[in-house]
Amino acid sequence: MSLQTWPGVLPKPERQPYGFRPDDSRLKRTGEVGPPAYRRMVSVSASRMSLFITVDRSNRQVFWDFYTLACADGTKAFNMPDPITDGWACLTGAGAPLLLPDGTPILLSRILLCRWGDEVPQETISGIEFKISFGVVIMP
């Protein structure tokens, strides 16, 4: 069984209302006195990302077909380009883009293994565009 891949025709998620939160991998121990103490419960943990895309009518259908058909109503994992890293220019320490000899910038690439978040995607309409918000769990 191969993993599904995020449809390349869909736009990158927008910066607002982007959210990122690592899952808490600590186990809290409380004593009778003093502050609480923590220890690591697991060696690696997942992270959660809240994403938002604006699409036209045809890409709206692409998104929902991916969610309902390819990912079986959000029950199957998928690969997705990292919306924060993938496609951005690699920079020098001074902040200038690194370039190939022909002047083309070197772009970063990162693919995430994701599962759908706890909530099902939500959609609103604004004029002729559809705004879809959804969450993903980034697997370690």
Image (spheres, rainbow, N blue to C red):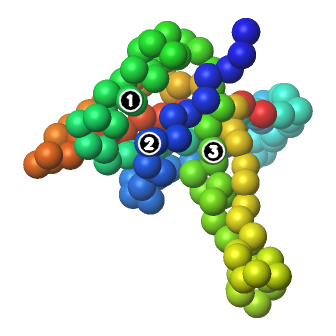
Q: Quadrant of residue 81?
A: top right
Q: Nearer the viewer, mark 3 or mark 2?
A: 2
Determine contact: label 2, label 1, CB under 8 Å.
yes
Residue placed furthest toward the left? 127
Element assignment for label 1: helix
Figure check: 35 above or below 80? below
Please provide percent x and percent y for residue 124: 21, 37
State the residue at coordinates (52%, 16%).
71
Q: Which element is circle 2 on?
A: loop
> 104 or 97, which is in the foreground?
104
Q: CA distance from mark 3 to mark 2?
A: 11 Å
Determine the residue positioned at 71% across, 16% down: 2
Q: Which residue is mark 1?
A: 62
33 left or right, relative to 3: right
Between marks 2 and 1, how big is the CA–CA gap? Answer: 8 Å
Q: Count every numbered label the image shows and give the total.
A: 3
Residue identifier under label 3: 81
The percent position of residue 64, horizontal first and vertical second, equals: 36, 24
State which tag comes first along the sequence, 2 or 1.
2
Give the amino acid at mark 3: Pro
